[in-house]
Image (spheres, coloured by chain):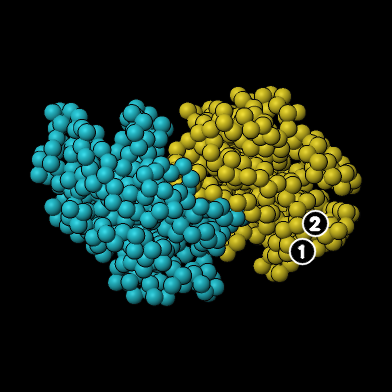
Chain colours: A yellow, B cyan
């Protein structure tokens, strides 16, 4: 077993603290990655605090992982020692169901194996990237293009793919008008990716202080959702809405901003239901859909796309000792736009 | 002006009663149809009782109209005197917006002109098919194939197209599993049409007494929504759900019956919102959509499809003097599956 240092939540109420644990030995198809950077995703906080239920403790969070390959199993063909590598939200899946065979492992019918807060085949809990190293089957490891910085690339592995996947799945592109609801970690990636796709982006936000960032990131319009005027001015305006907000909000108001046949895609996940009115959907054949991260091939395509278009996350790099303070700042929306832990600080 | 006999709701609280009113003269592009049959749609009751708000009184309901052409305007090219003709839920639209140009007049950006409970360009209220005759622009008149009986064809003009349009729009066909929620006027048409499309149909209903009808109409399975077991047995089972129920119900339970990338299509319109949980959509990229009737070309295609497949509505023909009693029976679900008024009774 590989003795590994990290930071863990020991219980749902506890702040994260230094924690030593064991990783499995490197198997024939495994890759050992020495982690250099790991992004902090809002879902890390939800799970570390057991806000979605079912959390496994102690928990080492982190699923936006970038590092360097330091060992490879005897049968590994895809990576060499010294190469950069990334790991996203899952580290395995059944590999045999329809979605897995189609490369949509995130929709694996047996359930994908989460990078942390999951249970591996041997029953052991998986542990994430707030740690020195990780062992992952080569089929679930991503290649990080050299055009991307390791720290700026880390959040692409969740925030990037979460927004890229639905934009590509629904064919959002030139000639489309897209609204991005919420300007946080997900929202800022959505603007960058949609802009690279040639899409006209409007940011809808509760906060006037996000206007400048929205425009700098590539939006062509910005509107306050706190103002009723927004919902009259932009009525039936958008082909797509990408909703990144994880606080409960009124879906109906946004649905009315869609054209006929428009689609509102939920990637933020409020933990409470919101009342849905059927008429705004029915009278204009609109749709509400959901989407979660992306498959491995698609995640690689996203990384390559980001390299081509020089897209990285806007980040604030912190030492791991500041992780609890960073959590509080994430909850206040006080980050532009993603914290990334520099794991060199762990030593 | 053309003096016309019909039955009208004089106020939201009044039963329907005999009513004389004026129709416009037959213009150059108009067709005068002597109405032989008109279906009773649940939405007639909603509107006659002002349950959706904004109703215009006196109101002659009815938008499932079949009759015989008795006069044509000087410029009419499509119909001849003596031919059978049908009129559905709308009698005009702007004809210039994107949806109108594409033949999706039901999504006209200026709003379609409803067959009744609408206001024509001259400001006069439109009046529906519980009447002796109607004057309609030829572009909004349907051809009733001779293979269909006039009475059995009437409900196709709303219940038929309401279910046909989304099934075709979403490409429901062979190799798909479809659930039809609710077995009333809409639901029974959905089974017949989906069966003709080669689709495997399961009926989900609150009522065991619908089982026999469901199977007779062509369903391959039937399950009670009052039993929790239904929602475990059929989890992730369907490619599509067509939800015809207009009473408030829990959408989330049904969403969980969809496979990954499955779509639940609302054609029934509860007047109250229902709480929507985002996770069941997000975790399997599922969608909830709405759909309303269909365009003129599509309605004609539906009528021709029904003629080819010998599909008519199951009906109970009544004289117009029984319309108020029929309304009460519709509200109790006591009809298999559509009342059709024989307008010969009006004389």
Rendered location of residue B320, percent (x, y):
26, 57
The residue drawn where x is 18% and y is 28% is B28
The residue drawn where x is 45% and y is 46% is A282
Name the secondary structure under disc 2. Answer: loop
Query: Viewed as shown, does residue A57 lie left or right of B310?
Result: right
Disc 2 crowd rating (10 Å Cα; few below 14, some 14-19, many 20+) is: some
**Circle 1 residue:** A56
Earlier-in-chain disc, 1 versus 2: 2
Rendered location of residue A254, percent (x, y):
58, 39
Q: CA distance from mark 1 to mark 2?
A: 10 Å
Name the secondary structure under disc 1. Answer: loop
Chain bearing mark 1:
A
Rendered location of residue A225, percent (x, y):
66, 34
The image's mark for residue A80 is none
Are marks 1 and 2 in one subunit?
Answer: yes
Query: Viewed as shown, does residue B214 lie left or right of A246?
Result: left
């Amino acid at each position: 077993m590989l003795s590994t240092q990290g930071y863990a939540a020991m219980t749902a109420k506890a702040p994260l603290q230094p924690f030593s644990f064991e990783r499995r030995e490197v198997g024939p198809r495994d890759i050992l990655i020495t982690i250099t950077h790991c992004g902090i995703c809002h879902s890390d906080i939800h799970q570390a605090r057991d806000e979605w239920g079912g959390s496994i403790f102690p928990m080492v969070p982190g699923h936006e992982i970038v590092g360097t390959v330091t060992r490879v199993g005897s049968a590994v063909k895809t990576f060499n020692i010294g190469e950069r590598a990334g790991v996203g939200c899952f580290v395995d899946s059944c590999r045999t169901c329809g979605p897995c065979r189609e490369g949509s492992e995130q929709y694996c019918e047996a359930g994908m194996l989460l990078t942390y807060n999951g249970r591996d085949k041997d029953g052991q809990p998986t542990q994430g990237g707030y740690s020195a190293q990780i062992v992952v089957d080569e089929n679930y490891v991503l290649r990080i293009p050299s055009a991307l910085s390791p720290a700026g690339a880390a959040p692409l592995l969740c925030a990037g793919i979460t927004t890229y996947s639905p934009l590509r799945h629904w064919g959002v592109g030139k000639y489309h008008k897209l609204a991005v609801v919420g300007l946080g970690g997900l929202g800022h990636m959505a603007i960058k990716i949609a802009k690279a796709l040639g899409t006209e982006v409007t940011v809808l936000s509760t906060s006037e202080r996000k206007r400048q960032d929205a425009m700098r990131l590539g939006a062509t319009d910005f509107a306050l959702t706190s103002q009723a005027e927004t919902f009259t001015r932009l009525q039936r305006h958008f082909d797509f809405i990408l909703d990144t907000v994880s606080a409960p909000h009124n879906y109906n108001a946004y649905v009315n901003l869609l054209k006929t046949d428009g689609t509102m895609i939920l990637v933020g996940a409020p933990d409470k239901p919101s009342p849905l009115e059927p008429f705004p959907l029915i009278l204009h054949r609109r749709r509400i859909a959901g989407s979660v991260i992306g498959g491995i091939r698609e995640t690689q395509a996203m990384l390559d796309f980001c390299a081509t278009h020089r897209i990285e996350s806007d980040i604030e790099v912190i030492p791991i000792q500041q992780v609890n303070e960073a959590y509080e700042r994430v909850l206040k929306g006080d980050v532009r736009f993603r914290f990334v832990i520099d794991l060199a600080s762990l030593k």
